[in-house]
Amino acid sequence: MSLPDPASSEPRAADRDLIANAAGGDERAIAALYDRYGEVLYAIAYRIVGQRADAEEVVIEAFAQAWRDAPRFEVARGSVAGWLTMIARSRALDLVRSRARRERITASAAADRSDGSPAMGGWRSDPALSLDQSERRQQVELALQKLSPPQRQAIELAYFEGLSQSEIAERLKEPLGTVKTRVRLGMQKLRECLRPFYFERGR
């Protein structure tokens, strides 16, 4: 499947205008591009990764990258559709390469947890651990406050109320693509805010 030629349906300027608006911080613009090209990018990603969930992840990651890189998009180097395709293919290939590594990490983590079975008395109350967890909760709360209200609302509905993205879209009366974009961009901002606390300390 190939991307539709923007010139055959929507004027090419429409895509460029959306990228320009996204570069200015308009999340509705990147959501509109998601609605326009999301299904085609999904098909491209699925051919590479071979799994639906992974293909969906690739598409969201691709649009999140497009959001970040929108200010650097150069019209002279090609169409928005071609640029999005290149990003999606790159993300899909990255995911395929990292899949084996993720599986090894998961297996290793499962083995580590099995060493501390509650039935064997391996879990004991650790005051230092409790303090650390409390501190982390505070950091998460502070990070949430740094999100835009729409991003924070979508993430709270997803992770605190357990709603699916489709249910969130229905409740908020927003397009599904907009909700997916908000959740993904919000989660990326949370990771950036929490990276020093979670990763630079060797956790």
Image (cartoon, rainbow, N blue to C red):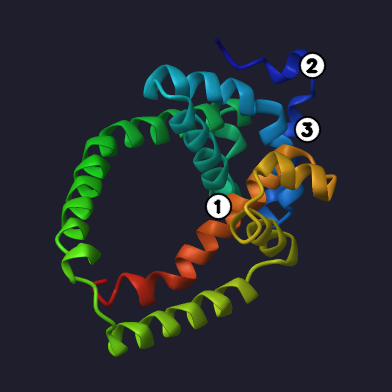
Spot occupied by residue 35 in the image (x, y as percentages of width and height): 71, 31
Residue type at tag 1: Arg
Give the numbered dot on residue 89: none
Q: Badge 3: how crowded within 10 Å, few (<14), some, or many (20+)?
A: some
* Sequence-first tag of 1 and 2: 2
Q: Badge 1: how crowded within 10 Å, few (<14), some, or many (20+)?
A: some
Secondary structure beneath label 2: loop
Residue 29 visible in the picture: no
Residue 7 visible in the picture: yes
Q: Quadrant of residue 154?
A: bottom right
145 vs 193, left or right, is: right
Residue type at tag 2: Ser
Above or below, comparing residue 53 to residue 40 in the picture: below
Q: Quadrant of residue 112?
A: bottom left
Q: Residue at x 64, y 68 (%)?
A: 147
Spot occupied by residue 176 in the image (x, y as percentages of width and height): 73, 38
Above or below, comparing residue 174 to residue 131 in the picture: above
24 vs 129, left or right, is: right
Secondary structure beneath label 1: helix
Q: Which one is nearer the viewer's eye here, 111 or 174?
A: 111
**In 3D space, how far apart are the residues under numbered discs 3 and 1 (Cα atoms)?**
19 Å
Spot occupied by residue 102 in the image (x, y as percentages of width and height): 27, 43
Q: Residue at x 29, y 88 (%)?
A: 128
Q: Which one is nearer the viewer's eye here, 17 or 95?
A: 95
* Sequence-first tag of 3 and 1: 3
Q: Are marks 1 and 2 in contact (CB under 8 Å)?
A: no
**In 3D space, how far apart are the residues under numbered discs 1 and 2 (Cα atoms)?**
27 Å
Q: Which residue is mark 3?
A: 14
Q: Quadrant of residue 122?
A: bottom left
Q: Which residue is mark 2?
A: 9
Secondary structure beneath label 3: helix
Give the numbered dot on residue 68: 1
